[in-house]
Image (cartoon, helix red, strand yellow):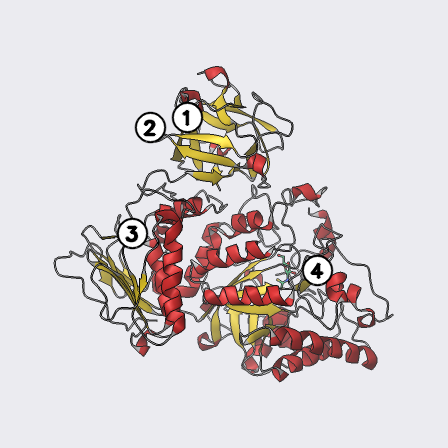
Amino acid sequence: MRSTRRRGRDLATLAALTLSLTLALPQPSAGAATVAKSSGGVSVASASAAAVVPQPVSQTDLTGSGFTLTAQTPVNVVPSGDPDAAGVGTYLAALLAPATGYTLPVTSASPPAAQSIVLDPNGPSSLGAEGYTLSSTGTGVTVTAHGAQGLFRGVQTLRQLLPAAIESTTVKPGPWTVAPVQISDTPRYAYRGVMVDVARRYFPMSQLKRYIDQAAAYKINTLHLHLTDDQGWRIAIGAIPSLTTIGASTQSGFTGGTNWYYTAAEYQEIVAYAKSRFMTVVPEIDGPGHTSAALASVANLNCDNKAIKPYSGFDVGISLYCLSDAQHVSNVSGFLTTVIDTVAAMTPGPYVHLGGDETPAATPSQYASYVSAATSAATARGKTVMGWHQLGQSTIPANSIMQWWGDSDDRATIGTSNETEDVQFVRNAVQQNAKFVMSPSDHAYLDMKYDSSTPYGLSWQGYVPLSKAYDWDPTTSTAKLNGTGSLVPADRIAGVEAALWADRAYSGSNELPKSTSQFPEPYVYAEHMTFPRLPAVAEIGWSPQSTHNYTDFSRRLGTHGARWTAAGINYYAAPDVPWTSGGGSGGAFNGVHTLATGGQALEVPAGATNGTQLRTSALLGGNSQKWTFTEQSDGSYTVANVASGLCVDVNAGSVSAGASIIQWTCTGNTNQRWKVAAASGGGHTLTSVKSNLVITTASTANGAAVTQQPASGSALQRWTIG
Ligand code: TNX
């Protein structure tokens, strides 16, 4: 793995590189036939099985027509005295409003009326904080939990029982029928996180909230914010304004920013937003390495008491607080106390993450003095310490949580005479009674490329295709390769976390960027790298190991692409997933989308006029790359550019292979109508109603020309509708 002293990729080349379930199952309602049987708590999928991700502990699909929502269907929250439970009802009604156009009444009748969606927080305590049961029949839907949090998790399942178009941001025709099913569910692990590296790439508030919503849909309950690093300091600390005036002025690849940070009010807004999605925020203040932004902002953290220049590059392992004499240890300690006090006071959750990774130049005693200063500041505020597993080399408070980011190379050395230091740090942490969150970097790092065609990210861990993101088990993450001898006992595993680093959040990331124009909006990067891999990690964190089966996972996940399309999520259509389209609700693609293949987006070139040929260039998500799909009476779509308002058109209505695809005044003629179909290799083809030829780009080079060609299955004709 990439540890400081023994690292899979060296720093110089980087720059050149370019439960077994005891819940009672609700009985199927009278007359309902069971089409998929539960066996040993594992559901057996049928072709029509409700495709829930993460897989519930127990699911029985029923026959019958299911429950169809009307504009009057009450969302009835059974009274419990818990205002958060009522909030889940309001949340559900708001979630269903855009696509249905309904303003469902949120009621609190006891007993509830028939034909309602019933949310009952008064279930037995055996359900635990997050468990729930869900019963959906022709007469209504009931979600039962022991408190608001379990209701919220159950509501995420309910939403997946509706047609894909329910995720649309504009009104769709419906019908809105909830698949008939009985579910009993509870998570495998209490901690299921995702980390966002807002330090290397600043995510504006709206994009961070969007990401929170996307993660919550897969029952992720922890948002770890990597708030500080070499390339930026993103959290306002009132007593040290230079941290934001100077420390927040850079990102990886950017200089000169004035507001690339979260004010105290904004941070609290994020914490509150996450809480409304039953997600805990873990703030990370990284150190003693990854500290250039602090070293640029506060002079006396440096041994020569001179602030360094703000850093906007792409390297790691380049910085260290000065910890080589008593005066500087005291400076660092005072600084950390101010910072951690401020952050802890704004953070209602139990954790503060103290980093600890990649400190090439620290001596053991310097490292220990950082850990001592940082952990005492955190514990003085009543916070539980989290840290990357390296933190475990030093003395840490009992019940600290270490985050394992090692890999199979480390596991291969367990029990040999050359155990890696990472393995030894884990042993040391376990001896101190630490718990662990598993983020194995060869499976759970969302910044790793899927394959060689991925435009963004790194590959120091090799590629991480969807199958690899799914194919691991926390109980063997720190075991020998044969799965035995886990360093971390099973009962010390708190859970899992996927990590979205943002060192290389730009197109063409095998090389250093030449221009900031290679950087898409953060959400474009985030969604491409996150979907479909975060659902894989979410399933590992939630579902019993006994349900683990990639074939079944990819079948279920394949129906989620249409949900993401409806929601406008820029996902990667991994080629080995059987993606299905719309779900029969019609007009599934109506709305604004990007169309991308290999990270290259269909666009109208700058300066184009009526008749200009379309091309593909790096996906950046501007209006020239956005297209409004409108379903026509024949089920095909017209596709109009958001910037120009002109329509995708086969030049002169040609039926010949090779004819150019241009933009032209919208006419509705058949040479401007496109049939959208899921392609077997992933993505969708757009076939001309006039010529029956498909929209094809010449290559993945920037500026490649777009023509119509016979369908060949080539990736150059399979578009991700983002
Ligand atoms: C390692 S994993 C890092 C980060 C980088 C990431 C890139 C860890 C604790 N540190 O600084 O962003 O690799 O993949």
- Asked if the beta carbon under badge 1 is closer than 8 A to the nearest atom of ligand 1, the reply is no
Q: Earlier in the sequence, mark 4 or mark 2?
A: 4
Mark 4 residue type: Gly
Mark 2 residue type: Asp
Q: Nearer the viewer, mark 4 or mark 2?
A: 2
Q: Earlier in the sequence, mark 1 or mark 4?
A: 4
- Residue identified by numbered label 4: 232
Q: Nearer the viewer, mark 3 or mark 1?
A: 3
Locate the N terminus by quadrant: bottom right
- Residue identified by numbered label 3: 71
Q: Earlier in the sequence, mark 1 or mark 2?
A: 2
The answer for how far apart the CA atoms under marks 1 and 2 are is: 9 Å
Query: Please, which residue is most extreme toward the left here?
Result: 31
The answer for how far apart the CA atoms under marks 1 and 4 are is: 47 Å
The answer for how far apart the CA atoms under marks 3 and 4 are is: 48 Å
Q: Quadrant of residue 454?
A: top right
Secondary structure under badge 2?
Answer: loop
Give the label on residue 634, or none.
2
Q: Residues within 10 Å of mark 2 (few under 14, many from 20)?
A: few
Q: Earlier in the sequence, mark 3 or mark 4?
A: 3
The reply to whether residue 485 is in sight is: no
Secondary structure under badge 3?
Answer: loop
Mark 1 residue type: Arg
Q: Residues within 10 Å of mark 3 (few under 14, many from 20)?
A: few
Q: Nearer the viewer, mark 2 or mark 3?
A: 3
Q: Residues within 10 Å of mark 1 (few under 14, many from 20)?
A: many
Q: Earlier in the sequence, mark 2 or mark 3?
A: 3
The answer for how far apart the CA atoms under marks 3 and 1 are is: 33 Å
Give the label on residue 673, or none.
1
